[in-house]
Image (cartoon, rainbow, N blue to C red):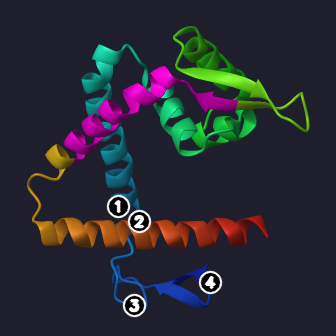
C-alpha cells in the first residue's frame, strides 16, 4: 500500500520500499529535521558560552542582531522575527535599553508604533558578535572541506528558498 502526499506541482508516493517516487529515502524528513534543529541549538549554545563576556542572553544578542540588520523594525515585527510574544520582546528591549544597546522611537506616522534602533554602543559590539559567530561556524565546520561547505551552503539556500515558497503557498 502506498501513501500519497501533495507537493506543489507533483504527487509523491511513498512505497513500502521506504523510497518515494523520486527514489529518496522517505524517512529523511524526520532525520534531517532533528539534525537541523539540534545543530541550530548547538550553534546557539556554543555562541552563548562565547558571548558571556558581553553579559547578553541569547534573546538579547539575537534582538541586537535583528535590529542591526533591519534598523527601525517595529516591536511587533521584532517579536515575530525572534519567535517570541509581544510582551516578551518588550521585556527584552527594556533590558537592552537599560544597557544602552537599543532605543525605541515613535513612528513618524503612527505615534503608537515604536521602532527599534541600535545605539552607538551596540554598533561597537556588533563586530565582536560577528567575529564570534564566524569563529563558531568555522569551528563547527572544521571537519568539512571547502567543497563540502560550499555544497552545504548551496543546499541550505535551496531549502530556505523552498521554505519561503511553501510559506507563501500556505498563506494563500
Quadrant location of residue 156? bottom left
Label 3 SS: loop
Horizontally, residue 138 falls left or right of residue 83, namely left
Q: Is residue 81 above or below residue 121?
A: below
Measured as percent of width and height from the top left, residue 172 is found at 79, 70
Residue drawn where x is 44% and y is 69% of the image: 159
Label 4 SS: loop
Q: What secondary structure is the stretch in magenta mostly built from? A: helix
Residue labelled with disc 4: 8
Measured as percent of width and height from the top left, residue 22 is found at 40, 90
Q: CA distance from mark 4 to mark 2?
A: 17 Å
Measured as percent of width and height from the top left, residue 69 is found at 53, 45
Q: Which residues are magenta?
A: 116-137
Q: Which mark is residue 22?
A: 3
Q: In terms of sequence position, does the residue under pointer 2 or pointer 3 come before the other?
A: 3
Between disc 3 and disc 4, the foreground one is: 4
Q: CA distance from mark 3 to mark 4?
A: 15 Å
Residue labelled with disc 1: 32
Horizontally, residue 43 falls left or right of residue 14, namely left
Amino acid at each position: 500500500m502506498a501513501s500519497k502526499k501533495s507537493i506543489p506541482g507533483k504527487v509523491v508516493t511513498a512505497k513500502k520500499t521506504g523510497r518515494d517516487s523520486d527514489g529518496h529515502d522517505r524517512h529523511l524528513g524526520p532525520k534531517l529535521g532533528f539534525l537541523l534543529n539540534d545543530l541550530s541549538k548547538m550553534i546557539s549554545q556554543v555562541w552563548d558560552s562565547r558571548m558571556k563576556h558581553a553579559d547578553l542572553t541569547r534573546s538579547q544578542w539575537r534582538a541586537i542582531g535583528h535590529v542591526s540588520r533591519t534598523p527601525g523594525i517595529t516591536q511587533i515585527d521584532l517579536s515575530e522575527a525572534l519567535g517570541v510574544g509581544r510582551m516578551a520582546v518588550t521585556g527584552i528591549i527594556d533590558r537592552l535599553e537599560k544597557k544602552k544597546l537599543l532605543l525605541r522611537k515613535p513612528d513618524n506616522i503612527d505615534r503608537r508604533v515604536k521602532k527599534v534602533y541600535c545605539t552607538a554602543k551596540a554598533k561597537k559590539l556588533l563586530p565582536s558578535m560577528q567575529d564570534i559567530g564566524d569563529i563558531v561556524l568555522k569551528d563547527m565546520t572544521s571537519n568539512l572541506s571547502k567543497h563540502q561547505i560550499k555544497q552545504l551552503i548551496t543546499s541550505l539556500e535551496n531549502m530556505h528558498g523552498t521554505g519561503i515558497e511553501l510559506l507563501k503557498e500556505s498563506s494563500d
